Image (cartoon, coloured by chain):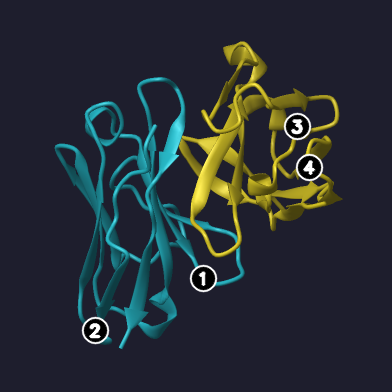
Chain colours: A yellow, B cyan
């Protein structure tokens, strides 16, 4: 079965760091760019950032709201994409999803992991 | 990059058609055929309904169709069914190699 599973969410204090993982299975992870998204409680979807496949340099891009604080990376040997979140703010509280990029669209999503930033 | 503009809500009776608009700029919607649409019932992950403006993934009913004119993309649901009630979001690739979502539209089946 083609799927991705997010993990690593939880309660964290403002200013601290947290790393999320997105574990893929059922497809050739090395061939795909992977994106992270988030959805604050009761709000809409927001794209956070992505990492290209190694074939396209493995480079990253970010939304302006997280640039400089968040970093996306990948470990193709483990089929895992990561989202390193630093200097967390209360407004980063959200369900975080990862998704597989195909034709500049996302047909595979995980169930999400909740990150709560609160003192 | 500002969010793409969608109407907050649309509604229709079963069997009717509804259309959701998604307005951006020439730097996103108008500049690329890289617009996709997602359905999100409450408490669930988004589901891809349309990619590259008008293509349907396998398993998506042909009641769902997409189009684009200038800086505005549209999703039409024909023959509305109760199971179509959900939030819908458009997504576009942008000229600075990022993505931007629409503000979201709640579809209500009367």
Q: Nearer the viewer, mark 1 or mark 3?
A: 3
Secondary element at image label 4: loop
Question: Is residue B49 shown above or below A104?
Answer: below
Say if labels 3 and 4 share a chain.
Answer: yes
Q: Which residue is mark 2?
A: B15
Q: Residue at x 64, y 26 (%)?
A: A31
Left or right: B16, with A96 as reference point = left
Secondary element at image label 2: loop
Dividing the picture into quadrants, the one containing residue B101 is: top left
Residue A117 at least partly seen: yes
Q: Residue at x 35, y 79 (%)?
A: B108
Secondary element at image label 1: loop
Say if labels 2 and 3 share a chain.
Answer: no
Q: Residue at x 55, y 72 (%)?
A: B42
Q: CA gap, disc 3 to disc 4?
A: 7 Å
- The residue lying toward the viewer, choosing from A4 and A21, is A21
Q: Nearer the viewer, mark 4 or mark 2?
A: 4
Q: Chain of mark 1?
A: B
Left or right: A104, with A21 as reference point = left
Secondary element at image label 3: loop
- Evaluate if marks 1 and 2 touch, with contact meaning CB atoms under 8 Å apart: no
Q: CA gap, disc 2 to disc 3?
A: 50 Å
- Evaluate if marks 4 and 2 touch, with contact meaning CB atoms under 8 Å apart: no
Mark 1 or mark 2, earlier in chain:
2
Q: Position of residue A49 (x, y in %)?
A: 59, 31
Instruction: Tell me the tag on residue A87.
Output: 3
Q: Position of residue A74 (x, y in %)?
A: 75, 25
């Amino acid at each position: 079965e083609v799927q991705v599973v997010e993990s690593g969410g939880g309660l964290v204090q403002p200013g601290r760091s947290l790393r999320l993982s997105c574990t893929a299975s059922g497809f050739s992870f090395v061939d795909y760019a992977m994106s992270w998204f988030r959805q604050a409680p009761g709000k809409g979807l927001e794209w956070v950032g992505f990492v290209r496949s190694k074939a396209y340099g493995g480079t990253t891009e970010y939304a302006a709201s997280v640039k400089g604080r968040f970093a996306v990376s990948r470990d193709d040997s483990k089929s895992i994409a990561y989202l390193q979140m630093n200097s967390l703010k209360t407004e980063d509280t959200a369900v975080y999803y990862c998704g597989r990029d195909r034709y500049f669209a996302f047909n595979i999503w995980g169930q999400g992991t909740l990150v709560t930033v609160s003192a | 990059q500002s969010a793409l503009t969608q109407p907050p809500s649309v509604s229709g009776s079963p069997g009717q058609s509804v259309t959701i608009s998604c307005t951006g700029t020439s730097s996103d919607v108008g500049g690329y055929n890289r617009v996709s649409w997602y359905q999100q019932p409450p408490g669930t992950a988004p589901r891809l309904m349309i990619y590259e403006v008008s293509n349907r993934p396998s398993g998506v009913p042909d009641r769902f169709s997409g189009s684009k004119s200038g800086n505005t993309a549209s999703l039409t649901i024909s023959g509305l069914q109760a199971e179509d009630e959900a939030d819908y979001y458009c997504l576009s690739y942008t000229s600075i190699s990022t993505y931007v979502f629409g503000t979201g539209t709640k579809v209500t089946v009367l």
